[in-house]
Amino acid sequence: MATATTTESPGFDLSLTEEQALVQRTARDFAREKVLPKAAEIDEHKKVPRELIDEMGKLGFMGIDVPERYGGSGMDRLTYMLVVEEINRACASTGVALCTHVSLGIEPILLFGTDAQKEKWLPDLARGQKIACFALSEPASGSDAAAMRTSARRDGDAWVLNGTKNFITNGSIAEVAIVFAQTDPALKHKGIAAFVVEKNTRGLVVGKLENKLGIRGSDTAQLVFQDCRVPAANLIGAVGDGFKIALATLDGGRISIAAQAVGIARACLEDALAYAKEREAFGKKIADFQAIQWKLADMATEIDAARLLTWKAATLKDQGAPHTLEAAEAKLFASDIAVKAARDCVQIFGGYGYLADFPAERHYRDAKITEIYEGTSEIMKLVIAEQVLAE
Ligand SMILES: Cc1cc2nc3c(=O)[nH]c(=O)nc-3n(C[C@H](O)[C@H](O)[C@H](O)COP(=O)(O)OP(=O)(O)OC[C@H]3O[C@@H](n4cnc5c(N)ncnc54)[C@H](O)[C@@H]3O)c2cc1C
């Protein structure tokens, strides 16, 4: 039953259900009490504590859209987006660990796995007892993912994988990896296959851990496959379905990156607002200057617009409707306004905005990644244009 509750925008009511509102409140309280106090330390020490992931597992967030029969919370995508916004408002590194696990790690099994595969992997993943990652990008192929060089060769009851995957979020901490590999280069994208590879598989080695501009607490690793034998039963879908699986997964993933961007932008607005009400210049609070007010007004407006696009895309996904266009629009717009909000947040903090002692500097570094991963803004425009032109 729909009951009135508010989003962060006073006076604008999208009538979340009682359950959605309860989950939103739970996520907000958890983010404020448990995640936010650790955010600066997570950034500095470049690690999200496993306890935080365990707690997200206990709250049901790590398997939020996994059906209850597989150990998940059985909730819809919109509810998941509410959680993603709250966690990322507190800490984008913790937020992306969650988004990658749910949207990219679990989703291919949920959408394309057999019953046996779901029963084997989903319960531990849904409870957060195991962490998942998604290995598509390579040193020489990111946007052009179909140009991947990682190979898969059938050998008896196994596939033998060779190659290197780059930039893999949760790469060194994940126990389960969704890995894409080429079975026949002549077939180009139609030769790609998707596999579930368990961390302890011989021939899978965690390579370089990346040192990054932002989301520094998020684990970003190379995964190296050297004659790595993966049981044939771990193939998801059919040989040749891999590219389709990757694109369908990314359609959903982009909605959660849009929600991540909304969360980061909200952190910028809330921190800038609090600072502007305190800081004085020329005998006034800086919030009294119109130049500051206009920045705050733009942030508030753009956050609401980005959230609406995100919720629209999530709702379409919940309805089983096509959402490639809407997911790309939400990610393009939300990442753009998050970067802008972070720039304005630093500006409102003045010199203090440039110091690591204040959160504005971290938001500025964290926001940028939302324009890059799960498809750059240029690729989002290609996707949107393709959809619009096809109409
Ligand atoms: C912190 C981090 C985490 C990541 N996590 C993951 C992960 O978990 N799993 C995973 O598989 N990957 C992950 N990635 C990889 C990420 O998705 C890619 O970096 C991204 O898709 C861009 O690919 P690229 O870096 O190879 O850039 P390139 O594809 O080389 O692009 C370089 C530039 O050229 C532009 N460009 C490329 N093609 C076109 C075109 N056709 N038209 C116009 N412009 C174009 C791009 O927009 C970009 O500006 C992560 C990356 C980072 C930095």
Image (cartoon, helix red, strand yellow):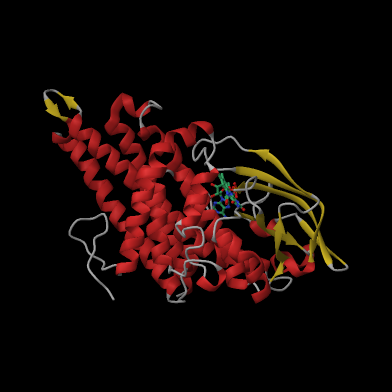
In the current view of this chain or complex, which residue is farthest to the front? 58
Q: Position of residue 180 (x, y in %)?
A: 69, 60
The picture places residue 64, in percent across and down from the top left corner, at: 47, 63
Residue at screen point 55% across, 62% down: 126
Coordinates of residue 103 in the picture (x, y in percent): 53, 60
Q: Nearer the viewer, residue 105 or 328?
A: 105
User: Residue 70 or 253: which is nearer the viewer?
Assistant: 70
Question: How many numbered circles are shown?
Answer: 0
**291 left or right of 74 in image:** left
Above or below, comparing residue 47 to residue 200 in the picture? above
Using residue 354 as the reference point, say whether residue 181 is left or right of it: right
Snapshot quadrant of residue 205: top right
Residue 168 position (above or below residue 124): above
Q: Is residue 46 visible?
A: yes
Quadrant in which the C terminus is drawn? bottom left
Q: Quadrant of the N terminus?
A: bottom left
Residue positioned 76% across, 69% down in the render: 233
Q: In this picture, is 60 found above or below 174?
A: below
Task: Judge by depth and name the residue closer to the eye, 369 or 199.
Answer: 199
Q: Residue furthest left?
A: 283
Q: In which image quadrant can residue 2 be found?
A: bottom left
Examine the rendering and report whether any part of residue 332 can be seen: no
Residue 360, located in which quarter of the rendered image? top left
**What's the residue at 40%, 57% (across, down)?**
83
Image coordinates of residue 290 in percent, x first then y, are 15, 37
In the displayed structure image, the side of residue 101 where residue 389 appears, left or right: left
Residue at the (65%, 66%) spot, across then down: 243
